[in-house]
Image: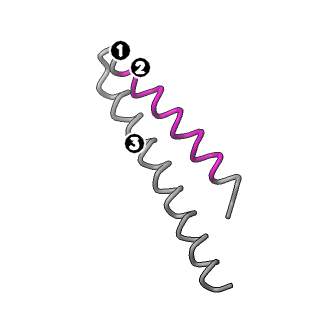
Amino acid sequence: MSIEKRVEATSKNIEGKVQEIMGEVTGNPADKAEGKAKQAEAQVTHTTENIKDELKKAID
């Protein structure tokens, strides 16, 4: 389990949520879409780390 990667992913998720909200407030669809993309990227990172953890548990 990589704590650093999880922290980075959580940070990117928060950044994406803020950007999405700002896009909604300002009416900027590009910001909103980019914020959602950052959140999706963060979710992929979390899922990857979860799979790595499960594989490690299975091997041990």
Badges 3 and 1: C-beta atoms under 8 Å apart?
no
Which label's residue is closer to the chain start, 2 or 3? 2
Seen at 29% across and 16% down, the residue is 27
Which label's residue is closer to the chain start, 3 or 1? 1
Q: Quadrant of the N terminus?
A: bottom right
The amino acid type, in three-letter code, at marker 3 is Ala
Q: Label 2, on which residue? A: 22
How far apart, in angstroms, are the residues tagged by discs 2 and 3?
A: 14 Å
Badges 2 and 1: C-beta atoms under 8 Å apart?
yes
- The coloring applied to the image is one colour
Q: Label 1, on which residue? A: 25
How far apart, in angstroms, are the residues tagged by discs 3 and 1?
A: 18 Å
Q: Nearer the viewer, residue 4 or 34?
A: 4
The amino acid type, in three-letter code, at marker 1 is Val
Tell whether 20 sits left or right of 13. Answer: left
Q: Nearer the viewer, residue 11 or 55?
A: 55
Q: Position of residue 2 (x, y in %)?
A: 69, 60
Crowd band around label 3 with a 10 angstrom C-alpha radius: few (<14), some (14–19), many (20+): some
Badges 2 and 3: C-beta atoms under 8 Å apart?
no
Crowd band around label 1 with a 10 angstrom C-alpha radius: few (<14), some (14–19), many (20+): few
Assign a secondary structure to mark 3: helix
Q: Label 3, on which residue? A: 37
Seen at 57% across and 63% down, the residue is 49
Q: Which residues are magenta?
A: 6-23
Assign a secondary structure to mark 1: helix
Seen at 45% across and 27% down, the residue is 19
